[in-house]
Amino acid sequence: MRRAYVLGGVLVVAGLVAAAVLADVIATAFLAVTVAYLLAPVRGWFVERGLSRWTASLLSTLLALAGAAALVAPLLVVTAVRLDRLVTLIQSLPDELPVRAFGMTYVVTLAQVQGPLVAYVSAVARAILAALPVLALKFALFVLLVFSLVHRAGEARRAVIAVVPPAYREVAEAFNDRVRGTLFGIYVLQAATALGTFLLALPTFAVLGYSSVVTLSVLAGVLQFVPIIGPSVLLGALALAAVSAGDPVQAALVLVVGGFVVAWLPDLLVRPRLARLAADMPGSLYFVGFVGGLLSLGTVGIIAGPLAVALVVEAAEQLSGELNGIEVADGD
């Protein structure tokens, strides 16, 4: 048994060395591991229906890629085609926005943020277009890793469990359920809600009279990945623009109709049907993980941050159950 633990330690050290050497693609590898982790049950479902492991792994990978393409493609199209209109929209905002409330007038100054915001949006778009060759290479690596990990999911799981002492394997299973539920919440639940938001936003913005319907709908869908805030920030900006243009009725319609259909209805229609499969984590903790991970690690932190918080929550529940002599059920 001691030999197995030594080999497990060697595996950890080798993994750390590999992470240091392959630092430029570590984010891609991390995302591939999380996606493959989530796809393992999907591959098992295909295998149970008579498909070979290789075919089941291929179909699972293609299914994940199709879902990713459905979410990312509209954003890329908007970035490439609608960038000029987005910049024009930002530049058209007034230098000062008077807001009247409770008999007093408050002036919100926008001139100081317009220039930096336009420069930032343009720089981000140029950086994305310039990095397309590198992104294409990393995407190919991502696909290869996902397929390989899904295909060898059983062997990888057995290797990890074998290193865990028998007395702690129940705890390891609880962490496994927590991680899978959290990843489901991040990838599937958020993606399904974003897609539902996009589909509902299309007719809503059209009825409200906006010309850039697709652009606004894509932005609303993307903002669903920002916890707590969501598309409300976009609706608020549109309402402010309507008020500055002297159209308070339009502002009220955006806040009321848009708030109901775009910001609230997707949560009502999509989340209750999928939330039971996700890890039970308060929205405030998810927000902390999202923001903290994003600021600390960049884009990959959107996944790593909430996942780290989920592991802390699970560890706290396990410790609490142990100290109180209560057996914590897996996934609770």
Image (cartoon, grey):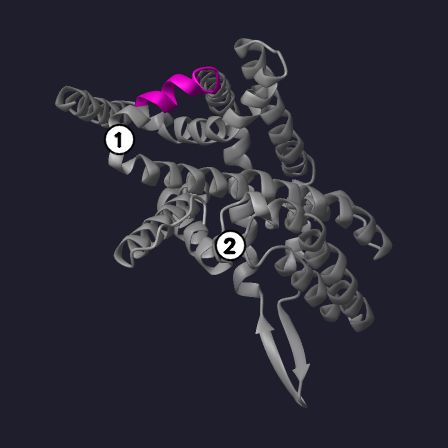
Where does the N terminus fall, quadrant-wise? Answer: top left
Residue 44, image quadrant: top right
Residue 264 rendering spot, x and y as whole percentages: 69, 58
Who comes first in sequence, dot 1 or dot 2? Answer: 2
Q: Number of callouts in the render?
A: 2
- Any mark on residue 288, and which? none
Identify the residue shown where x is 57% and y is 25%: 42
Q: Which residues are magenta?
A: 149-159
Q: Amino acid at mark 1?
A: Val
Q: Amino acid at mark 2?
A: Pro
Residue 298 rendering spot, x and y as whole percentages: 41, 42
Q: Main secondary structure of the magenta part?
A: helix
Q: Which residue is mark 1?
A: 164
Judge left or right: residue 117 versus residue 30: right
Residue 34 rendering spot, x and y as whole percentages: 45, 32
Give the Cα separation between the discs numbered 1 and 2: 52 Å
Judge left or right: residue 262 versus residue 315: right
Q: Which residue is mark 2?
A: 116
Identify the residue shown where x is 29% and y is 55%: 325
